Amino acid sequence: MRTRRGTAGLRGWGGVGAMGLACAVAGSLVLALPDRGDRGDDGVRQDGPGSTVAAQARADADDCNDRSLRPSPKDGPTIEKIRNREVKKLIVGVDQNSYRWGYRDPNKKGGELEGFDIDLAREIAEEIFGDRDAVVFRAIPTNERIPAIQSGQVDMVVRTMTVNCERLKDVDFSTGYFETGQQVLAPKKSDITGYDPSLTGKKICSASGSIAEDELKKKNYSADISTTVPNQLDCLVRLQLGEVDAVVTDSALAAGQAAQDPTVELKGEEPFTTEHYGVAMKKGSDDLVRRVNKVLDDYRENGGWQKSYDKWLKEGLGKSSGPPDPEYRD
């Protein structure tokens, strides 16, 4: 296991302006997915049933192999289907509200999505179509990531999505491309000290369908965990408005939010879980999974991963020990 990334040296956008921006982002930049079965603005047919994913019991560790398929440059039926459809672009589900991961900089003209996850999505598009711009980004809330893949609304999700056994029942994942873990975000003046008994009696916010929500259900130190939101940034807004006392989310996302609002900080010396983000794809799309893993291998080796990290995340997370080592099952 690689050394955990630090969160020291956070520098933000500044005070009230940042808080107002967070509220504006959460309130105005959430794009609804097209109705399943309809044609989206990009002209791509949206096939598949409009079903939601029922919660399933977590698989025992011994019954789950969360390693991914070995990389391969070969085409297959999934890739051929993507290439042969009317619109010659990769359709990727992303976030547009996560600072430095997938977001729109209000200070730049055009409002194009940018960030660490956006860079990776463009790398995959270049591998499949030979063009980094051959990609359509669809903003999806946390709790719609898996349904969007299963219904065919997106080819994949690149959206700070943790690989775990429960999700592997519903989607396939690439190997991990980033290591993180759950941590508590709270006001600097708060008496909360981390994921510990200091949460007793506090009101905690998490994103619906997130690992944070799962962890809080397992152990919440008698906190009120009833506040859940579709998009994780909405928790920051609730925190700024004083509607909740703390947020539980990925440390990488929390560091970005602390950079946006210098009145909040990560609590506890380090995350209380260890997780890897992966690219999620439809179950059974083995050729696409292998191709994405090839992209990730190349991205590690050619310095692309480190370049993107230094551009987007180093300021908030500090010096990186690099991406997690890939783990393959065959």
Image (cartoon, rainbow, N blue to C red):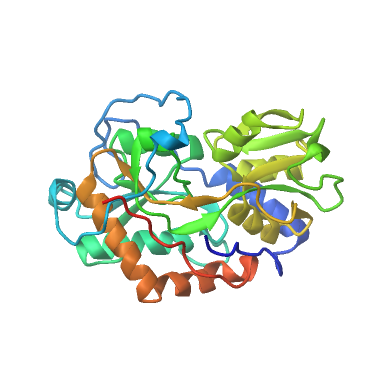
Q: Is residue 191 left or right of residue 275?
A: right
Is residue 274 toward the left or the right of residue 187 in the image? left
Q: Is residue 2 above or below residue 180?
A: below
- On the question of residue 33 being in view, the answer is no
Residue sitting at the far front: 62
- Residue at figure coordinates x 27%, y 32% from the top left: 38
User: In the image, what residue occupies the spot 30% across and 66% down?
Assistant: 132
Q: Position of residue 109 (x, y in %)?
A: 49, 66
Up-down: is 69 above or below 123?
A: above
Kindly identify the residue that appears in the image at 21 percent across and 67 percent down: 130
- Position of 83 with respect to 212 (left or right) is left
Viewer-closest of 210 and 5? 5
- Of residue 281 and residue 84, the one placed in the foreground of this image is 281
User: Looking at the image, is 272 positioned above or below residue 18?
Assistant: above
Residue 125: x and y in percent read 28, 60
- Tally of numbered tags: 0
Whether residue 125 is visible: yes
Instruction: Say whether residue 35 is left or right of residue 260.
Output: left
Q: Residue at x 70, y 57 (%)?
A: 258
Vertical placement of 170 versus 182: above or below?
A: above
Estimate the x, y position of residue 198 in percent, counting from the top left: 83, 40
Choose top left, top right, bottom left or bottom right for residue 172.
top left
